[in-house]
Image (cartoon, rainbow, N blue to C red):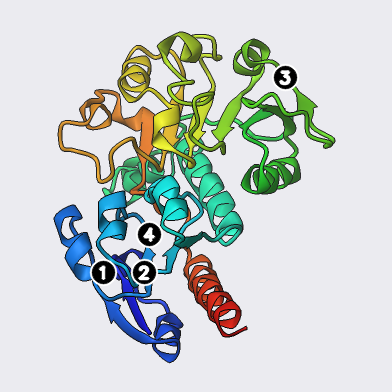
Amino acid sequence: MKIVFLDARTLGDVPNLDQLNALGDTIFHPDTQPEQVSERIQGAEVVISNKVKVTREAMANTPDLKLICVAATGMNNVDLAAAEELDIQVRNVKGYSTDSVAQQTFALLLALLNSTTYYDEYVKTGEYSKERIFTHLGRPYWELNGKRFGILGLGEIGRQVARIAMAFGAEVVYFSASGQDYNVIYERLELNEFLQTCDVISIHAPLSPATENLINYERISQMKPTALLLNTSRGGIVNEPDLAKALDNEVIAGAAIDVFTQEPIPASHPYLQVQKKEKLLLAPHIAWSSIEARTRLMDKVADNIRGYLEKKVN
């Protein structure tokens, strides 16, 4: 059986990648351009892709293809309707990155809130050595304890973030873009109250018609001027030019962003043009990618292939 991994570099150097070799004749491509997909998957029974798009045309030209394994949770890179019509199974992976994303959410929040980079540079550049008192209060910060922590999207990751926020002593509330009322101890708020009363808003919702462009300038303007916005979910939920404008206009105190509408971001991206750079903390879509999360992901991809093979034999 031929297995083709179209973008293996997206998993990096994980210790269990080689287990695919025991399942079939595996070809690892570090990355694949759209025009290369059809040629590279020829003769493959199983195709693995993290972000490379597998189109109807590519599937139709590969009669041996029986299984597409998405090395991620979101499956928007696969034409699911075409796969169903062509009797090609599609399997994704869920739950592998919950702890990783939650941890990075707080790493970003605390670095932004506590001005970690600023104070590190203050000491290392020698400015602290010139001080006449024992401390430097150049950038005040506030505690999470007692503050209202709002979560947009209370799925598995959102709930883990909620648990950590409560450990800090924050009051957790949530907004459900889908309208679903979860059976949880946290209060559900309507959007206006959610925006107006939260000290931190952390986004953990999928990108959907209900969430696309949800956080625009008008809605950011409803937030407290001291509030912080975090997005480690999907770039399209936040209107990027609007957030850049809001930060420069000091509408909110700051934002930390790990996901973008286009990835990698272009050099002309609005976030890279922000004048008040201290208000914006950026990361290159890494929240999902702890070593443990990538290892779990690879294990579950392999499990999906094993499950397919077992059913094939039976």
How packed mark 3 is, by other alpha carbons closer than 10 Å (few <14, some 14-19, many 20 or more), is: some
> Who's the residue at 61% across and 24% down the image?
199
| Residue contact between numbered discs 1 and 2, judged by CB atoms under 8 Å | yes
Image quadrant in which the C terminus is located: bottom right
In this view of the protein, can residue 138 be seen by the observer?
Answer: no
Is 194 situated left or right of 118 in this image?
right
- Measure the C-alpha gap from mark 2 to mark 3: 46 Å
- The numbered dot on residue 189 is 3
- Measure the C-alpha gap from mark 4 to mark 3: 35 Å
Image quadrant in which the N terminus is located: bottom left
- The numbered dot on residue 65 is 2
Residue under numbered circle 1: 41
Residue under numbered circle 4: 50
Q: Nearer the viewer, residue 275 or 63?
A: 63
Of the image marks 1 and 2, the number of the one nearer the N terminus = 1
Q: Is residue 244 above or below residue 145?
A: above
Mark nearer the viewer, 3 or 1: 1
Mark nearer the viewer, 2 or 4: 2
